[in-house]
Amino acid sequence: MDKNNFPVGVFDSGIGGLTVWKDLVADLPNESVIYYADSANCPYGPRKQEEIIQLASKVVDFLISENCKIIIVACNTATAAAIDFLRSKYSVPFIGMEPAVKPAALNSKTKSIAVLATEGTFNGKLYTETSRKYAKDVVLNIKVGDKLVDIVEKGLINDPSTKSHLAALVKTLIDENIDHLVLGCTHFPFLTEVLTEVLPPNIRIIDPAPAVVQQTKKILEMNDLTKKEFSNPEYRFYSSGNSYTLKNMLKEITDLKYEIYEL
Ligand code: DGL
């Protein structure tokens, strides 16, 4: 079989990467996609780097055994901890995620921006380098999104307690007069609606998914891996744990046909 017809692989610690999957299938509607949610090991955020490298390698082994032609690490935490290792170990191209500090810093008028991410992402070399490079002229406020991954994984996005939790979390950022809030974890765009309710209207929320999809498109083209002939794409989802939340979230975000498997 022609390599161009092989699927795109996407993974995250859980359902967060669906925020990337959704944009990916909208922008590259011809490509088949295999999504892996490492739900048995979610969250990755508080784990040690070595542990995340081991978990990510196991997921990548699986995606490669399923013939994925390119892999999107749809998880900022896994990118921060493991992307260098993955790129050195496997020959398949990888697309990583990093908080979109650059566009936020460039467009800030108040010269104050914030990043909301996991502990693991802030501890990574990638974050340190990006912020040093792009946030020289702005005040960069960082906030660990405590409990937010858990809230999304438990399907509590619209629970009243989520709104008050978010309001308390962003209060100090509002006091710092930020005008951009960068979502540095793929779970967080699911909270955009509630965030909008607790943030003043002048604060722009930045979701990095569209930029990641553009980068995927570019790397597929550069490596001559884009699917050429039109045939119905297949969408498969694998979960290393319980797939309950995955099922519920997919029902909400797509009308496309897909299959879900628990491993
Ligand atoms: N969705 C993830 C990220 O982008 C991982 C969150 C977690 O497992 O802690 O960072």
Image (cartoon, helix red, strand yellow):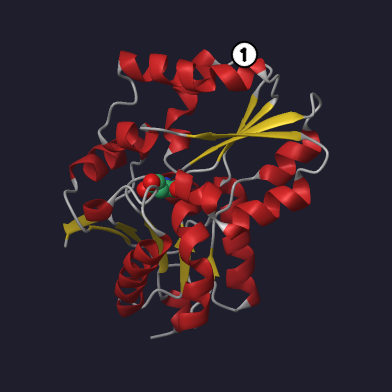
Counting from the top left corner in percent of width and height, residue 234 is at 33, 62
Image quadrant in which the C terminus is located: bottom left
* Of residues 167 and 240, the one drawn nearer to the viewer in this rendering: 167
Regarding residue 33, the answer to whether it shows in the image is: no
* Of residues 8 and 60, the one drawn nearer to the viewer in this rendering: 60
Residue 261 falls in image quadrant: bottom left
Counting from the top left corner in percent of width and height, residue 254 is at 35, 41
- The CB of the residue at mark 1 lies under 8 Å from ligand 1: no
Q: How many marks?
A: 1
Residue found at the very far bottom of the displayed protein? 1
Relative to 83, 241 lies left or right: left
Give SS at disc 1.
loop
Relative to 4, 263 lies left or right: left
Q: Which residue is mark 1?
A: 200
Relative to 205, 137 lies left or right: right
Q: Is residue 203 above or below residue 261?
A: above
Counting from the top left corner in percent of width and height, residue 145 is at 45, 34
* Amino acid beneath label 1: Pro
Q: Write the residue at 74% across / 28% down.
A: 112
Residue 201 falls in image quadrant: top right
Q: Write the residue at 43% across / 75% down.
A: 5
Q: Is residue 244 above or below residue 170?
A: below
Q: Is residue 246 above or below residue 199?
A: below
Counting from the top left corner in percent of width and height, residue 78 is at 44, 58
Image quadrant in which the N terminus is located: bottom left
Q: Write the residue at 50% across / 47% down.
A: 23
